[in-house]
Image (spheres, grey):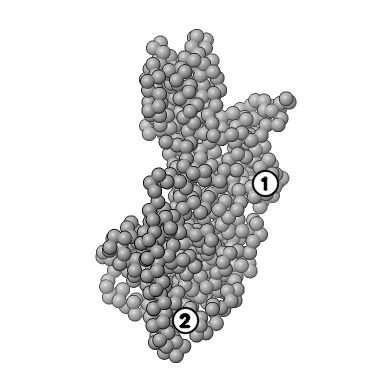
Amino acid sequence: MSETETTYREAVRAAIREAMLQDERVFLMGEDVGAYGGCYAVSMGLLEEFGEERIRDTPLSESAFTGAGIGAAMGGMRPIVEVMTVNFSLLALDQIMNTAATIRHMSGGQFGVPVVIRMATGAGKQLAAQHSHSLEGWFAHIPGIRVLAPATLEDARGMLWTALQDPDPVLIFENALLYNMKGKLAADAGPVDIGNAAVRREGDQVTLITYGGSLHKTLQAAEDLAEQDIAAEVIDLRTLRPLDDATIMASVRKTRRAVIVDEGWRSGSLSAEISARITEQAFWDLDAPVGRVCSVEVPIPYPKHLEDAAIPQVPGIVQAARETLGR
Amino acid sequence: MTEPRQSPHPRVSREHVLHLLTQMIRIRRFEEKCAELYTQEKIRGFLHLYIGEEAVATGVMEAVEPDDAIVATYREHGHAIVRGIPMTKIMAEMYGKQEGCSRGRGGSMHIFDAETRFYGGNAIVGGGLPLAIGLALADKMQKRSRVTVCFFGEGAAAEGEFHESLNLAALWKLPVLFVCENNRYAMGTALDRSESETDIHKKAASYRIEARAVDGMNVVDVEAAAREAVAAVRESGAPRFLECRTYRFRAHSMFDAQLYRDKAEVEAMREQGPIKRLTEWATGTHFIHDDDLERIEAQVAREVDDAVAFAEAGTWEPIQDLTRDVMAEGPEAVQ
């Protein structure tokens, strides 16, 4: 099968482009998605190709344009709303939580909201405490929406189309550090499932559970562990809501040890949720307490050395994995 | 029975006056019954009555086509009734019964009805405006000649979503009629205690939306203004803004002791009540007669009784169904 060299950014762009070509109800709107080409250059060139009607630059009105996406979805369109960063999504949280996630229920099943909302998340670019957080775990708390975190080129390319077929709201979190990630993608790469976690590396001594930008650090940690004769299995959650408990538990029952790597803060986090589920469902299979590698509980600082120290890194993941083995 | 909806002007005929009066009395008697049922604990939660404001929903809805969309607030029983959702299904919703228009899941504040394109029932002040511009955007992009009518109170003017949505509607030229139901109090906060500019329609005008204020206690004025505005929205595709100056006779909700306003003020406003005014004018000019009123009241009383009987006979959704209608495919696979 032929492959092409591409980046995560180009894969997301190809996914948007394909969706626009395949379904005339699809359109993109958000801050600087058009003339500027997207804050992270994801939508570069799309305005020229599709025009202002379908590549809509919006005012800096997160609540109104997210709500407009919700309304347009209810009116028969298939909008892709881009929110520049997860921190800005808090300005649209009312619409996401109080409208998108509740309308199907409040209306007794009469109205659904097939909107897709994409946003950048995560630290690592020295953008300090208002542009660097990982709040996807908060959104994963909300019933009524699906939350995706594509970490690979295949998922960056393939999740969007599947999300657009979903009759309910789907939030896609793209870790900003991944946009420049290069790799090979099959020339015929297309839609992928959005229901299952994926085992990205097999091993039988400890399960490392992660998603998004932390996947690649975790895979590096697994490589380092292999050099120390520790066989780690790496699970990429892919979908943060609903969680794929079956894949997680099957792995934990095999390895009897688990470490969760989550760029969110530790308290009240997605990692806490996963740890609780492992305790509920696989407690008697465990040989060690569940470990966690999370962000330190501090707003993300600007200086590089402090930012690096605030978020999960390879040595910390290696250490947490070794601890579950008593090493 | 009603005037042709496309017409930008109402024609005042005996039939039409009777129709307007009937619609307002339907709202009034339905809600009086709701208040009674609330004290009997048949209806729980928040109950926000529209009593006093009936002319607004009634007048505006005369201008709207079946294909148009309605977005309303948590004080929306009246809008739902005059939009044509059966009173039986609305009352069952108030009870929380599964025969309700939202299967009982919404209650008083969340009336939805796909058939009449009634999009709630939004209990976040200002939260309906972004939804409304989105519905209008979908119409515009799909080249449909529909209008979205978005109701909200004057309290919404303090919310960012109000300003964001008005700007976007004007910037993108979206077919929305914004209807501000200015009843002078945001819960207990008087307008002049919360806004530096109390002429709400001027805020809309600052976004270059053609905006005007109208006497919201006069149903004929409201209807005339709404017909003109809806026709203009349909014709131009651009938004319009109507500020209807009205007054809420009852408490904000059933928990409100009304410490923030004088009883005398309420009494004075009751004298200008929309049903009273239309009745006095129409009987004074011999458009209608006392027996018309008796007939309307009897007919509405039957409709309300039927609605209560329907709700009483309704059934509770089984608890096993608790997680339905969260996601499309039934109960979500999340424990």
Q: Which amino acid does label 1 sit on?
A: Asp
Tell which of B321 and B233 is nearer to you. B321
Please name which of the two marks, 2 or 1, marks the residue nearer to the observer: 2
Q: Where is residue A15 in the image (x, y as percent from the top left)?
A: 65, 38
In the image, what residue occupies the spot 39% across and 73% down? B302
Q: Which chain carries label 1?
A: A
Q: Which chain carries label 2?
A: B
Q: Where is residue B108 in the image (x, y as percent from the top left)?
A: 39, 60
In the image, what residue occupies the spot 45% across and 37% down? B334
Tell which of A284 and B231 is nearer to you. A284
Q: Quadrant location of the N terminus of chain A?
A: top right
Q: Quadrant location of the C terminus of chain A?
A: top left
B223 sits left or right of B137 in the view: left
Q: Where is residue A67 in the image (x, y as percent from the top left)?
A: 52, 52
Please tell me whether residue A80 is drawn above or below residue B145 in the rendered image: above
Tell which of A38 and A195 is nearer to you. A195
- Residue that numbered label 2 is attached to: B18
Secondary structure at numbered mark 1: loop
In the image, what residue occupies the spot 58% across and 55% down? A75
Please tell me whether residue B328 is drawn above or below residue B287 in the rendered image: above
Q: Where is residue B141 in the image (x, y as percent from the top left)?
A: 64, 56
Secondary structure at numbered mark 2: helix
Count of numbered marks: 2
Q: Which amino acid does label 2 sit on?
A: Leu
User: Is residue A42 shown to the viewer in this render?
Assistant: no
- Residue that numbered label 1 is attached to: A23
Crowd tier of the residue under label 1, counting other residues whose Cα lies within 10 Å: few below 14, some 14–19, many 20 or above: few
Please tell me whether residue A110 is drawn above or below residue B152 in the rendered image: above
In the image, what residue occupies the spot 50% across and 71% down? B60
Instruction: Find the distance from the CA under tag 2 to the CA under tag 1.
Output: 49 Å
Which label sits on residue B171? none
